[in-house]
Amino acid sequence: MERRDVRKLLEGVAAGEVDLVHAEELLASAPFEDLGYAKPDLHRGMRQGVSEVIYGAGKTAEQIVGIAGSLRSAGERRVLITRIDKDKAKAVREGLSAEDADAFEYHELANLATVGDAPKPDGVGYVAVCAAGTSDLYCAEEAALTAEMLGSRVVRLYDVGVAGLHRLLAHLEEIQGASVIVAVAGMEGALASVVGGLASCPVIACPTSVGYGASLGGVAALLSMLNSCASGVSVVNIDNGFGAGYQAALIDHVSVRGARDEGE
């Protein structure tokens, strides 16, 4: 249950629209469920505003099914599963309840799955996800889909790397109008600095492992981004599209959360 759901529940009780006993039952659940192999955090949405996300790599399909089922049973309307391949996603779908299987969707390019639809965007603006090349789209889509599942509107600007700067400048309006930008690039990672010099909003640089030998699996791009001369650029780990998308969604919702906390 996310924080906004708790607020609506309490408002319903105060207005006499929700039965007090029913509300008590919803809020009295344990903070986590012990499944033996995992302890799904059932109160993370109340603490952080976003429910627990399942990291699929290294987990069996059966374990993912159990964790997702636990979260859904606790009232989570949507579950995000990262780093999950096509075969494992198929096995997860087959193991879910009929209702959750119908709500399951696999995004092969991003190696990401969702249970439940993305919420209606309610951020302060939009997240612009810029990908240097087509080879970077696996990471860019992970960032974009994550931000959408967290309630942000996403504008995708793909294949806008610095090897053809005119392609990026053709999207200057979208870049300058964003509330936050995710710049995804491999090779030398120069895209983040160029975007950072064009935008007035925070830029989250996400290096990818794309490139030839001296790119060192993304280390070259990572170091380039860390040494960016553009102000306002921060950096996540190599291939961490999820982390970039998550952080972007938080930034996109800063003013919204402040208004909610004040009861507006």
Image (tube, rainbow, N blue to C red):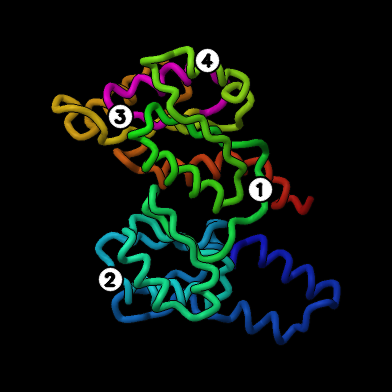
In screen coordinates, is 181 left or right of 237?
Answer: right
Q: Is residue 195 magenta?
A: yes
Measuring from the top left, give residue 107's x and y in whole percent: 43, 54
Describe the element under mark 1 as helix, strand or loop: loop
Secondary structure at badge 2 equals loop
What residue is disc 4 on? Answer: 169
Which of the marked residues, 1 or 3, is nearer the chain's N terminus?
Answer: 1
Task: Reply above or below: 69 against 111.
Answer: below
Query: Looking at the image, is 98 positioned above or below residue 248?
Result: below
For disc 1, the marked residue is 121
Amino acid type, callout 3: Gly
Q: Which quadrant would residue 155 be assigned to in this image?
A: top right
Check residue 104 in the rendering and tell me which mark sits there, or answer none: none
Residue drawn at 47 percent across, 33 percent down: 182
In the rendered view of the protein, which quadrant contains the N terminus? bottom right
User: Going 35% across and 35% down the picture, which residue do you hit?
Assistant: 136
Element type at mark 3:
loop
Q: Which residues are magenta?
A: 184-202
Q: Which mark is residue 186?
A: 3
Residue tagged 2: 60
Judge the density around disc 2: few (<14), some (14-19), many (≥20) Cα neighbours within 10 Å: some
Badge 4 or badge 2: first in the primary sequence: 2
